[in-house]
Amino acid sequence: MSAPRPCNRLTVVVAAYNEADSLPLLHPRIGAVLDGLRAQGVDGQVLYVDDGSADASWAVMQRLASADPRVACLRLSRNFGKELALTAGLDRVLEGAALILDADGQDPPELIPRFVEKWREGYDDVHGTRRQRAGEGWVKRGTAHAFYRVIGRLSKTPIPRDTGDFRLLSPRALDALRQLRERHRFMKGLFGWVGFNRIAIPYERDARMAGRSKFNLWRLWNFALEGITSFSTAPLRLATYLGLLTAAVAFAYGAWIILKALFWGDPVAGWPTMMSVILFLGGVQLIALGLIGEYLGRLYDEAKQRPLYLVDTWHPATGVSSAQV
Ligand code: UDP
Ligand code: MG
């Protein structure tokens, strides 16, 4: 492990999309934790990112900022999704470590001091691993469970199981993460790619304090696709093997038909066989094409080189040194 580094500044980054009901409940909890950290010599701040909310979230953030000089808020020009909102937030943490927290209180802020403790011990990526997920149905828990196992198998990048975005990143891990500017951002994979000294903190995931989850099953499915295509080319290889297998069977069957016709003649045309072969081959080809399309689409998005997000308004924390611009 590397030599101890000064650990005196921490920014809690909270991405929020339509969380006007949760934020006023969450902020006092974060505030209390930051007060406690202050006593230990850690200068804590909060950065709220409004991911193009349609409700009063932005007004709530501004109110919190005017009442508490430790609050900075950033508003994106529209809803870019949690991963990009977090990226926007992390891009603004120019000094010290960052800690990522959900706005709905599912990741308890009261655990932050334990993350900071691990950071002080020299860890760069301290992540919360869910022991339990209160208030989430069995479908969500079951699919999440399966997802972590599949991606663990497919991807060469280590992606810890049952680990969300609740984590602390040291300055050098943050710096490394900032260099990864890909558009399709599967954050769990990106954190894993960065590496350095990592440690898990098991915790019980609470139910939401207010509002409802933004991730329905369809969004989760797309999220899983994003994860797999961003961190593994195994599906492409699978298509190759599927194609090879189909071709081998087709050649063997073709040889058999030719031999049969040569030796015994060809009395009746095999309509059912022909139809099944055509449909089978057509199906396999379409699946392989679709797979290639998934990767090609992502390549197309990367090739456009658009900015990852656009900022509408940026209010730095008033009680912060000028290094934080
Ligand atoms: N979120 C966001 N942009 C979005 C969707 C969600 O910033 O487009 C935020 C949301 O406000 C919350 C966090 O991401 O702070 C996690 O979202 P949610 O609680 O809906 O997901 P779940 O916990 O159900 O997986
Ligand atoms: Mg949540």
Image (spheres, rainbow, N blue to C red):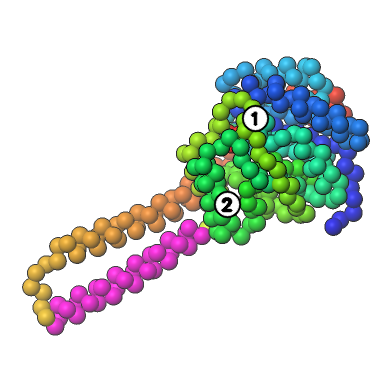
Left or right of 254 in this view: 91: right
Q: Is residue 76 visible?
A: no
Q: Residue at x 10, y 78 (%)?
A: 265
Tag of residue 104: 1
Residue at x-position 17% and y-position 62% = 272
Compare residues 259 and 142 and report the one nearer the observer: 142
In percent of the image, x 37 and y 69: which residue is there? 245
Ligand 2 has an atom within 8 Å of the beta carbon of the residue at disc 1: yes
Question: Is 93 left, or right, of 192 in this rendering?
Answer: right
* SS label for mark 2: helix
Give the distance between the C-alpha atoms of the residues marked 2 and 1, in whole angstroms. Answer: 23 Å
Segment tinted magenta in the rendering:
234-263
Main SS, magenta residues:
helix
Magenta run includes residue 248: yes
Q: Residue 170 at what x, y percent from top left?
A: 79, 45
What's under tag 2, amino acid-wise?
A: Tyr
